[in-house]
Image (cartoon, rainbow, N blue to C red):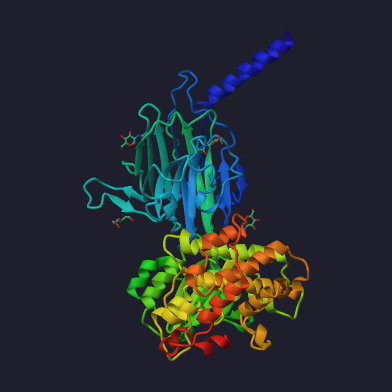
Amino acid sequence: MILEFLVWLLLFGRSVASSEQEDVGFTYNGFRGVNLTMDGLAQITENGLLMLVNTTTQQMGHAFYPHPLHFRNLSTADALSSFSTTFVFAIWKSTRFGGPGMAFVISPSRDFTGALPGNYLGLFNTTNIGNSSNHVIAIELDFLRNLEFKDIDGNHVGIDINDLKSLQSAPASYFISKDAKNRYVNLSLTDGQHLQLWVEYHGKQKQLNVTVAPINIPKPTIPLLSLKIDLSPIIVDPMFVGFSAATYALPVSHYVLGWSFKLNGEARELNLSQLPKPPLQKSHIKRRPRVFIVAFSVIAATFVSISIFFVIQFIVKRKNKFAEVLEDWELDYGPHRFKYKDLYIATKGFKDKELLGTGGFGRVYRGVLPTTKTQVAVKRVSHNSRQGEREFIAEIVSIGKLRHRSIVTLLGYCRRKGELLLVYDFMPNGSLEKFLFDRTTTETMLNWCQRFRIIKNVAAALLYLHEEWEQVVVHRDVKSRNVLLDKELNGRLGDFGLARLYDHGTDPQTTHVVGTLGYLAPELCKTGKTNPSVDVFAFGIFLLEVACGRKPIEPQASEECLVLVDWVISCWSRGTILDTVDPKLGLNYEVEEMELVLKLGLLCSHSIPTERPNMRQVMRYLEGEISLPELTPLGLRTAIDDTSFLPSKGFSDISIWCPLSSAMTQ
Ligand SMILES: *[C@@H]1O[C@H](CO)[C@@H](O)[C@H](O)[C@H]1NC(C)=O
Ligand SMILES: *[C@@H]1O[C@H](CO)[C@@H](O)[C@H](O)[C@H]1NC(C)=O
Ligand SMILES: *[C@@H]1O[C@H](CO)[C@@H](O)[C@H](O)[C@H]1NC(C)=O
Ligand SMILES: *[C@@H]1O[C@H](CO)[C@@H](O)[C@H](O)[C@H]1NC(C)=O
């Protein structure tokens, strides 16, 4: 009997609870003390801001109202309730590639463990994106244009269902008046201004409206997005509501200041004056006692008037010091440009102590960006030619859009008179060259497994450049020095576009090279034409370098060993190809993999371009999906001798393409 009563109570109690939740609503003017279910980087700050992500890159954060919501009317089983929500948010990003943004989310689960950061907004991953079993509704505030998801621009609001390809989207803007010339006023989502977003769904009309506006103007009467859609197939019972945000390669700050939600009704208005202030805003400076202020101002006034002269002088000097060249057309590239001053501070004035290395085209410094505290590498390239500069900058910007885990991200650039600064992701382990050829230490030895992984990384990067990006990019300077190692010793290809710069603005007086001797495909010296097979050639040499731990040309070595390719071929023809393996590896390597790498290296550096595999085939050889064609050392050698590895005839005509002496000294 008692048991029966308890069961009844349980059932009844539950149904009471859920029928109460039908009209659930909440309003948070700031989040201090509010119980939200959070994960990833999301947190509530001391002053009550909901911070979805901090400045850590490639991460995500979620914050959800902790209780499940029942969007279906219990009385009329399948009718979907109306709902409405509004929140105030503020977002900053420091450069063009901060992003991708944040979203208001309605989802059957609060658990997004398998989701990806970056483009995927912390909502989906590559397998479940677009799947109708997701049941996810998201209103995205997206400030990274992603062609994969057919984004219209880099500053838009969109309605997403189960996917990040928006059903409807529009550049962030708000309606002012039918009569105005521009009925909508554009907004920037990411300049830190406080914006308010409204999402409203009418269950009977089956209409979803989204409106955005700055907080100091009343809610616009016409929404930005208005979509006729029946959400009842999407919404299951129960659902959770909350936010998701993700970061990409650069830090962004996302804050939600206040949030109000209501099922079956209009969300209560937020009390804007009660909302907490995000940190970058000037916070209230403590007021000093009056006497102090008076005394202080008298002293200060005299002091100021004396020093004003010096200050002006100082400012003028300083201005000159940090002067940069900015031309009209560069304004188009906007935040992709870094301020010289920031880079100057970041590298402590390009101090020698911060010098990471000296590359073919300039010196590289370690730096910490003053605004975001991100570690970067700043490459200082001196260039005197003005010709081709514009194309070059355009190219830099487009290269900056390359995104691949095995490519060192170019974050931006800065230009000064006769000087170009390129800002890259910082790679803590530096160049692979150091690991391969530095004979002074054994500690930094890479084992075979690490080397093989690096080889695959570089192959994947080249495949992306040649075939998978929107344009074909030829790197033109693949070599171990240009492969950098990240924290986990993954290989990342770096140093793009520099060869290109000197191509555009070729100046025969100085030693400009396109590529490095020893890695130059022979046909380059004859025709000067660049195509992906040139990279494949250099990649072949790179494979031999990694396997043998030797430079492609070793001037001190005996005649036989002078040119690495020749040496490997001659050992192979004697049946002792494994004699060429880097002695530092001892016997600790997979024989099969090693032979594959050595022979593939020879195949890739075949002197006849058409005999070389393309990067997709290379990838398949390395993954063991297909086996190498039958090769004989004799066949390879004939081919190589035939066309001669080093340029001979016709060399003088094209000498600027292959400046032997300058490349030798590199
Ligand atoms: C961001 O938050 C995570 C987790 O709360 C923390 O480990 C990390 O240090 C934070 N990063 C910054 C830059 O504040
Ligand atoms: C969608 O997800 C469900 C459940 O995870 C799965 O069974 C189904 O195969 C997926 N559909 C597609 C097209 O991937
Ligand atoms: C607003 O932005 C859109 C898209 O970015 C642009 O086409 C339009 O010209 C802009 N309108 C105004 C008034 O600036
Ligand atoms: C959505 O906007 C349209 C056009 O302004 C309006 O007629 C409709 O009532 C709105 N619906 C909701 C649910 O707010």
Left or right: residue 212 compared with residue 296: left
In-front residue for pair 478/197: 478
Residue 238 picture location, percent across and down: 55, 29
Residue 469 picture location, percent across and down: 45, 60
Relative to 334, is 360 above or below?
A: below
Relative to 222, is 376 above or below?
A: below
Figure label count? 0
Q: Quadrant of ligand 2?
A: top right
In-front residue for pair 211/48: 211
Residue found at the very far right of the displayed protein? 587
Quadrant of the frame with the C terminus: bottom right
Quadrant of the frame with the N terminus: top right
| Residue at x 70%, y 11% (from the top left corner) | 4
- Does residue 88 appear in the picture of this structure? yes
Left or right: residue 128 compared with residue 418: right
Relative to 385, is 77 above or below?
A: above
Residue 91 picture location, percent across and down: 48, 55
Q: Quadrant of residue 439?
A: bottom right
Residue 555 picture location, percent across and down: 64, 88
Relative to 20, is 648 above or below?
A: below
- Does residue 285 appear in the picture of this structure? no
Left or right: residue 122 compared with residue 181: right
In-front residue for pair 379/281: 379
In-front residue for pair 274/427: 427
| Residue at x 50%, y 61% (from the top left corner) | 464
Q: Quadrant of residue 543?
A: bottom right
